[in-house]
Every structure is written in structure tokens, then in C-alpha cells.
């Protein structure tokens, strides 16, 4: 597995590399935004760890450019900004997860494993509910026959809901089973991803919000569309 670490603080970059290499990952490093973007565009990686506060080009700009060019390599944002706005912005741009400095290297490794595991999951099954089709082998999605590009986390979130049509799934259950852990993640993480999925699927996205609880995979009612 190849991981790109884009982090301008070399002691942190070195620490991340040491822990990931112990787990068998092939780690490449960049120390500013421009070289990080160039590396991400010129090589193929299984995951990118991306600092937000980078010189020359910040992490959100890199993520935006990669997603705009249809590069959906899983991204984990790493930021010193303890601000929910920054975390939500990263998720809305298409990041799969985030950690806030200072962080435990073991926690970061656990999150890397979870994201890589989700993005590499391959089965022979397909799901087809309420006009949405998922091919779990090729990890391609479509809505009424029109292709929809989902991040690795968005894909797994949709798949988890689709496999349980009509059931109300609590946010805590989604965090545990889609992200692979719930510690350190707020329920706002789920809400942001659901909002992004709805944007991609359109007004008739078959996801019902159950206030104070979670979400259910159901066709929208007439009232919910008005």
C-alpha cells in the first residue's frame, strides 16, 4: 500500500512515516502544497494524509483540485486547527476522515487502516434500491442509470443504509460500522457526509432524516420534496 504524506513539519512527517512503515506501508513524503499536489497527480497512491496549513498551496486547495480532476484517492486531513468549520470544510470537499493535532500516531494508523480497508473492500454483490445502484465489486454507483462519483466513505455509507432499507440507523451505529470506530468522531461527521450524498443524488435522494436519531434508506415523500 502506497501512502503520500503531505506535511510541512518534518518531525511530524517523520513520525507518521515511521509508524506507517512499521505497518508495512510504502510512504512517500512532500513538504509543501505544490510538490504534494504534483506528486498526487503524477503517481498512484492508496491514501493521502494531507495537512491543511501547508505553504504554497493549502490542503483544502489540493483536495479541491484532486476531486475536480476526478481523482478520488482516499484523503485524511491532518490539521492543527481545532475548529469544526475546518473539519466540516474538509469533509465537504471530499475528504474521508480527519485528525486534529496533537494526535496519537497509533490513532492515525488506526484511521489509515480503516479508510484503506473500506476503499479496498471487494465483493461480488450488487445493491439496487430506490433507483440507486451500487456495484460492490467495482465500487461504482449510479442513480437512475446516471453514474454518480462517491468517495470511499460515501460509498460505504450508502451501501450500509441500502442493505437495511426502511430501518432507522443511529448515527453512532454508522460511525462504528462505516468508519470502523466512533471514538474521537462527532455525529456531525455523519451529517456532513449525508448532505454531500444528497447533493450528488439530487432532490429525490432516498434518505430520510430521523431527528435526534439517525437516517433511513427510504424514498422521499411528497411532503419532504416541498
Image (cartoon, rainbow, N blue to C red):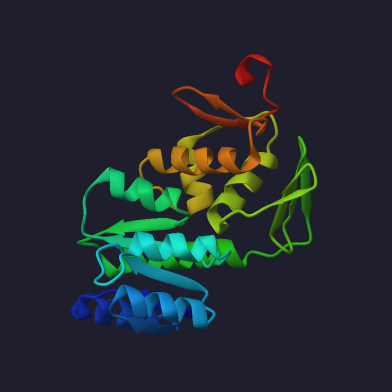
Depth check: 20 or 130 in front? 130
Above or below: residue 89 compared with residue 73: above
- Percent coordinates x, y for residue 81 in the rendering: 21, 54
Inspect this view and state whether residue 80 appears.
Answer: yes
Please state if 53 lies on the left or on the right of 183 as rendered: left
- Percent coordinates x, y for residue 82 in the rendering: 21, 50
- Percent coordinates x, y for residue 114 in the rendering: 48, 62
Tell me which corner region of the image, top left, top right, bottom left or bottom right, holds residue 103: bottom left
From this viewpoint, which residue is outermost toward the top?
223
Please state if 33 lies on the left or on the right of 133 as rendered: left
Tell me which corner region of the image, top left, top right, bottom left or bottom right, holds residue 215: top right
Which residue occupies 61% across, 52% down? 155
Inspect this view and state whether residue 1 appears.
Answer: no
Quadrant containing the C terminus is top right
Depth check: 69 or 215 in front? 69
Above or below: residue 212 compared with residue 65: above
- Percent coordinates x, y for residue 102 in the rendering: 20, 62
Which residue occupies 44% across, 24% down? 212
Above or below: residue 43 compared with residue 225: below
Amino acid at each position: 500500500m502506497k501512502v503520500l504524506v503531505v506535511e510541512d513539519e518534518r518531525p511530524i512527517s517523520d513520525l507518521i512515516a515511521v509508524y506507517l512503515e512499521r505497518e508495512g506501508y510504502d510512504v512517500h513524503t512532500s513538504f509543501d502544497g505544490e510538490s504534494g499536489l504534483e506528486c498526487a497527480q503524477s503517481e498512484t497512491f492508496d491514501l493521502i494524509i494531507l495537512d491543511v496549513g501547508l505553504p504554497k498551496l493549502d490542503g483544502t486547495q489540493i483536495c479541491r483540485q484532486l476531486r475536480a480532476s476526478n481523482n478520488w484517492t482516499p484523503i485524511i486531513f491532518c490539521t492543527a486547527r481545532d475548529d469544526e468549520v475546518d473539519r466540516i470544510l474538509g469533509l465537504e470537499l471530499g475528504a474521508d476522515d480527519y485528525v486534529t493535532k496533537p494526535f496519537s500516531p497509533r490513532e492515525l494508523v488506526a484511521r489509515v487502516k480503516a479508510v484503506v480497508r473500506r476503499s479496498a473492500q471487494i465483493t461480488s454483490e450488487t445493491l439496487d434500491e430506490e433507483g440507486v445502484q451500487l456495484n460492490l465489486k467495482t465500487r461504482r454507483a449510479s442513480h437512475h442509470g446516471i453514474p454518480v462519483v462517491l468517495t470511499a466513505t460515501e460509498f460505504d455509507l450508502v451501501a450500509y443504509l441500502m442493505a437495511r432499507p426502511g430501518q432507522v440507523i443511529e448515527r453512532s451505529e454508522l460511525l462504528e460500522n462505516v468508519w470502523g470506530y466512533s471514538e474521537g468522531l462527532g455525529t456531525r461527521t455523519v451529517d456532513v457526509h449525508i448532505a454531500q450524498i444528497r447533493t450528488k443524488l439530487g432532490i429525490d435522494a432516498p434518505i430520510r432524516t430521523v431527528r435526534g436519531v439517525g437516517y433511513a434508506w427510504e424514498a422521499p415523500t411528497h411532503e419532504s420534496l416541498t
